[in-house]
Image (cartoon, grey):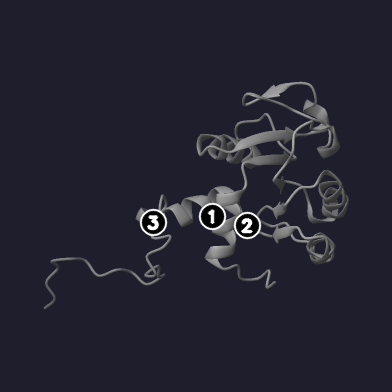
Amino acid sequence: MDHNAYADDYIGGILNEVKTVAVVGASSNPSRPSYYVMKYMKRKGYRCIPVNPGLAGQELLGEMAYASLSDIPDPIDMVDCFRSSDAIPPIVDEAIKIGAKVIWMQLGVRHDEAAKVAEATGLRVVMNRCPKIEFGRLSGEIAFMGGRSDVISSKRSKLVGKKTS
């Protein structure tokens, strides 16, 4: 697997198949990325279960928060990691133990050795990507901003109807 360039079919397949997402590093602060990614994914029909020891036992966005993946009583399809890269190996180990199918590391998070361990046990891995962004891109929601137009450019666009002398 080339973790520098994911095929749309790979990402889309994951997003179409998973239903329950454990969000490791979930925050109750609405300005944090984990909060608004959870909120967005819930609106798209995913069940997002927050994992954060500081929030354990509290409700966040309609779901009970848990201290660890192992504490979640329901099956988990995908583990979305909002933690630093050095925190990923134990998360992968725990995801393997609970039978998760996918490890998803958020933007800026990458751990190649942990990815190899996960893949060796059959888990699919995505690194340095955001499921919210990928869902929006693949569904066409962000196409109006040029996300899938194939014409994104740093060059200044020509003004329509401007006469040149």
Gap between marks 1 and 2, in whole Å?
7 Å
Task: Give the camera-side residue of 35 and 47.
Answer: 47
Q: Secondary structure at mark 3?
A: helix
> Which residue is depicted at the point 87% across and 51% down?
93
Q: Amino acid at mark 2?
A: Arg
Residue ID for mark 1:
134
Q: Are marks 1 and 2 in contact (CB under 8 Å)?
A: yes
> How many other residues sit within 10 Å of disc 3, few (<14), some (14-19) or many (≥20)?
some
Looking at the image, residue 38 lies above or below residue 155: above
Q: Amino acid at mark 1?
A: Glu
Count of residue discs: 3
Q: Secondary structure at mark 2?
A: loop
Rendering coords of residue 142 (x, y %): 42, 52
Task: Give the camera-side residue of 28 and 60.
Answer: 60
Rendering coords of residue 56 (x, y %): 80, 26
Q: Point out the image quarter for the C terminus.
A: bottom left
Q: Are marks 3 and 1 in contact (CB under 8 Å)?
A: no
> How many other residues sit within 10 Å of disc 2, few (<14), some (14-19) or many (≥20)?
some
Rendering coords of residue 36 (x, y %): 58, 37
Residue ID for mark 3:
143
Task: Give the camera-side residue of 67 and 152.
Answer: 67
Gap between marks 3 and 1, in whole Å?
11 Å
Residue ID for mark 2:
129
> Which residue is depicted at the point 59% across and 50% down?
17
> Which residue is depicted at the point 61% across and 71% down?
5
